[in-house]
Amino acid sequence: MDEKKNMDKELSEMLRGVPPQNILISFDGKPAKSLADYAKERQEQARQKKRRPRDDRER
């Protein structure tokens, strides 16, 4: 566990100051996207969840 914390700390120090559009990340064999693109997608998904009407609520 301590080794993982050290790796996390090293990575965060290496990436400090790097613009999010310059950091490319790939998950589950999908094509790499910039960190900025992933952040936009997550914000859009959160926004869509907030706008959905709840089915269990009476109107």
Image (tube, grey):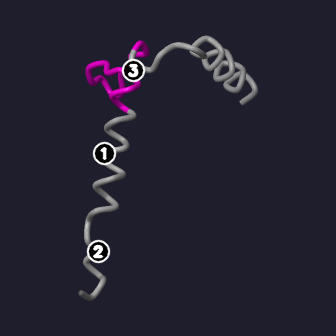
Q: Which residue position is annotated with label 3?
A: 25
Q: Quadrant of the C terminus?
A: bottom left
Determine the secondary structure under disc 2.
loop
For the magenta stretch, what is the residue range?
22-38
Q: CA distance from mark 3 to mark 1?
A: 19 Å
What amino acid is at disc 1?
A: Glu
Q: Camera-side residue: 45 or 31?
A: 45
What amino acid is at disc 2?
A: Arg
Residue 44 lies, with reference to residue 9, above or below; the image says below
Instruction: Looking at this view, name the residue that lies furthest to the right.
Output: 2
**Dot 2 and dot 3 residues touching (CB under 8 Å):** no
Q: CA distance from mark 2 to mark 1?
A: 18 Å
Among the two numbered marks 2 and 1 on one chain, the one whose residue lies closer to the N terminus: 1
Which image quarter: residue 42?
top left
The residue under the point 27% across, 24% down is: 30
Q: Camera-side residue: 43 or 6?
A: 43
**Left of 13 or right of it: where is 34?**
left
Which image quarter: residue 48?
bottom left
Determine the secondary structure under disc 1.
helix
Is residue 24 highlighted in magenta? Answer: yes
Q: Which residue position is annotated with label 1?
A: 44
What amino acid is at disc 3?
A: Ile
User: How far across and how far down the image is residue 12, in percent?
Assistant: 62, 20
Among the two numbered marks 3 and 1 on one chain, the one whose residue lies closer to the N terminus: 3
Among the two numbered marks 2 and 3 on one chain, the one whose residue lies closer to the N terminus: 3
Q: Which mark is residue 54?
A: 2
